[in-house]
Structure formats: C-alpha cells, structure tokens
Image (cartoon, rainbow, N blue to C red):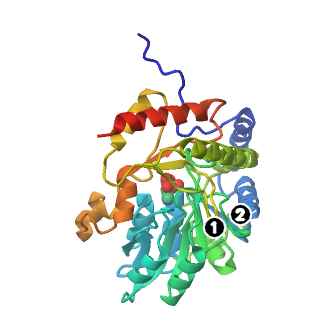
Amino acid sequence: MNDTPPRQIAFARPFLDDTLRSSVLRVLSGTTLVHGPVTHEFEQRFAARAFAKHAITVSSCTAGMHLGLFVQGVEAGDRVAVPAITHVATAHAARFCGADPLFVDVEPDTGNMDAAALSGALTGQDRVKAVIIVHFLGLPCDMDAINATAAKAGAFVMEDCAIALDATYGNRKAGTLGRLGCFSFYPTKHMTTIEGGMITTDDDALAATLRARRAFGYDKGLGERTRPGVYDVNALGYNYRMNEVEAAVGLAQMEHLDAWQQARALNHAALRRGLAALDEVTVFAPEKGNARSSHFCLNAVLPRDGSISRDLVIDRLKARGVGTSVHYPKALPLMAYYRERYGYKPGQFPVSEWLGDQSISLPVGPHIGPGDIDYIVGEFKEAVRRGRR
Ligand SMILES: Cc1ncc(COP(=O)(O)O)c(C=O)c1O
C-alpha cells in the first residue's frame, strides 16, 4: 500500500525567485552592506504602501516592539497591556524593559483584544504606559474603542502588525492606527526578508528617535558624518538594524505583494465557504465593522468542550499532506515563564485559553495551487470526523 498523500501543501512557503537572487547578488558584489541605499528605498516604498509618514527598518518585529517601548520610556515598575493570546514576543517586549504585562482577554468572534476588557483591566492601574494590540491573524482591532480607552488611561498604543500587512481600518492601514506599528518579515509572513521587521509611525520626532536608537544612539547617520568617527552618542541605543541584503530581499518581495494579497483573499474566501457547513467549527470572519483582514491564514477553532481533539485533527492533516500552524499554542499567561512569574491559573482568560487550546490555522498563501482548497476542505472534514472523542 502506498501511504504517500496525493498532495503536499505547506502552511507557508516563501517565494524566492531569480530576480530576488540577482538583487541579493548585486548587494553582495557592492561595497555597502549596511546603512545603505537599498534599506532606504525599502523604507520609502514600505511607508508609501502602509500610508505611513515614516517606516524604519529593524532586525525583527520583536526588536521593533522592544525599541518602540524603550524609546518612549517604558521601564521597570510600568505595566503594558497586551492580549492574552498572541506570540510571546508581544509580552516579552514589555519584559525587556523591565515592565510587567497586563494581560487582557480577547473577543470570541475575532481573537482581538476586547476593548471592554481593556477598560476593566486599566481601572485602578496607575502605571500603564502602553497598550500593545495585535491584529489577530490580520483583522484590525476595534481601534476607535481601544485608542479612546488607552488615551483615558494616559497610555500610548503600539500595534503588533506581525501578521497584518495591508489590513485596513476604514481608509487607513494597520501600522498607522496607533502611535506606531511593528511588522514582521519572518519567512512565514505575508512577505519576508528572512529575518527582519519594520516600524511605522506618523510622528516625526518619534521616527528620528527610533532611527538613532536602533543604531547605538549615534547622533549622526553614516551619510551625515564628515569623516570617520565623527559622531556623538546622546542616548542608549541597540544594534537593531536591518542589513542591505535583507532589504534587497524585501524590495524584491514587494513587487509581488499585490498579487499575493489577492490570492490570499480568494483562497481564504473559498476555504471559508468550504468549511461553512461544519457547525461545530468556528471560523472567524475576515471583516468586522470597517476592519478588513490581511488574510494571514484561516483559523478553524474546535469546540471549547474538547469534544474534538486538536492533536488528532492536526496529526491527520499532516499525514494527508496538509500543513497547519497554531496561533498560538497556549494563552500567554499560561506559558510557564508568565505562569510561574505571576501565578496565573487556568480559567482567568477563557477566550484566549479556548483559542490557545483549540485553534488550528489553515494555509491560504499564494503557494496554494489549483485544487488545493478543495483538497484541504475534504481532508479537514475527514480529520474532524476522526478527531471526535
Ligand atoms: C503577533 C506576532 N508578534 C510578533 C512576532 C515576532 O516576529 P519576529 O519573528 O519578526 O520578531 C510574531 C511571530 O510570529 C507574531 O505572530
């Protein structure tokens, strides 16, 4: 018997073509590997795409979020509100500054931070300096409510846009909906620079500070120095720069983004239609109010009562060649580091815990080929049938 599945569909597959390879080789054949024109062009092109005044390359989204908190004075003793279901980087950014995360549960229909829960969590807290929101799987949060709630508490809002590239809120894009936004270019994301990230902001002074302090706190960029070594350092800064090779990869990827985003939207819609009849499985809508998703993936959430086993479903899909991911493997307060440090117990963040335990992310990326969606739908239905306990 032949056990090889008829298809192999990865959860994500970055597209790296010959044009991209040529632009990387061009950088490698030149003399400028950091601080150069390719990074500058990537920043300008990205800012234009995000409808942002400034875009600042960094070495990862995590570095960008740390920098964003650090340069705005977040420090030990402060608190930073974060959703209870997200990548650990969101809360770690606060911890890097010595601040403590203030976890907030999320909405059951979107996975986004619940503005009412945020308001409750901020009540009686006097040292909340920042609110980091995550546009969960690409759908923008209810930013009007979140911004108003944060402003009342005197906190600034930073968007974790790691998987929200091109998501829209009315006529604005993710990354311009708070004071600053941070994007990720990790290989599984909407586009990649291998590792890398971008900060967007409309605030001129903040942009200048971020630029200086992603590079040691130099008071002059390389191009502004009249002779080597002519700079001063007037603030603490990190080395969180992106290099020219990564930026060349990013620029080459941007050439394809329109087509890729269109493919994601179509794949998401087709997959959602295919799974619509599965009553026990919750699939989040890619829009709510004036928010429109960037269709990072399709999340299928199994029942809260555990009557269908996520492990069995994922294992079956894997055996049938369908790659999946999990966003995210556990509610963050229950990850050992946070649980042990702050003493959280199961039951405190019910929606986040449900998503952490029962959510499966299915692929919708542009690598999906003809017939793949029907195959995923068929295999998912069968996996759910076999996953019942
Ligand atoms: C919501 C979120 N924030 C941050 C990150 C971390 O991004 P990076 O790997 O670029 O630091 C991820 C990575 O998957 C993520 O999903």
Above or below, 10 relative to 214 = above
Foreground: 216 or 229?
216
Task: Tell me if label 1 and label 2 are in contact, CB under 8 Å.
Answer: yes
Q: Is residue 231 visible?
A: yes
Which residue is at 32% across, 64% downward?
Answer: 333
The percent position of residue 108, horizontal first and vertical second, equals 45, 63
Residue type at numbered disc 2: Ala
For ligand 1, tell me if the residue under mark 2 lies within 8 Å: no
Res 175 label: 1
CA distance separating discs 1 and 2: 7 Å
The percent position of residue 221, horizontal first and vertical second, equals 67, 67
Which residue is at 31% across, 49% downward?
Answer: 306
- The C terminus is located in which quarter? top left
Q: Is residue 31 visible?
A: no
Q: For mark 1, give the secondary structure.
A: loop
The percent position of residue 176, horizontal first and vertical second, equals 66, 71
Using the rendered view, name the quadrant where residue 340 is placed: bottom left
Res 50 label: 2
* Of the image marks 1 and 2, the number of the one nearer the N terminus: 2
Which residue is at 73% across, 59% downward?
Answer: 40
Q: Is residue 105 left or right of residue 132?
A: left
Residue type at numbered disc 1: Gly
Res 131 label: none
The percent position of residue 388, horizontal first and vertical second, equals 33, 39
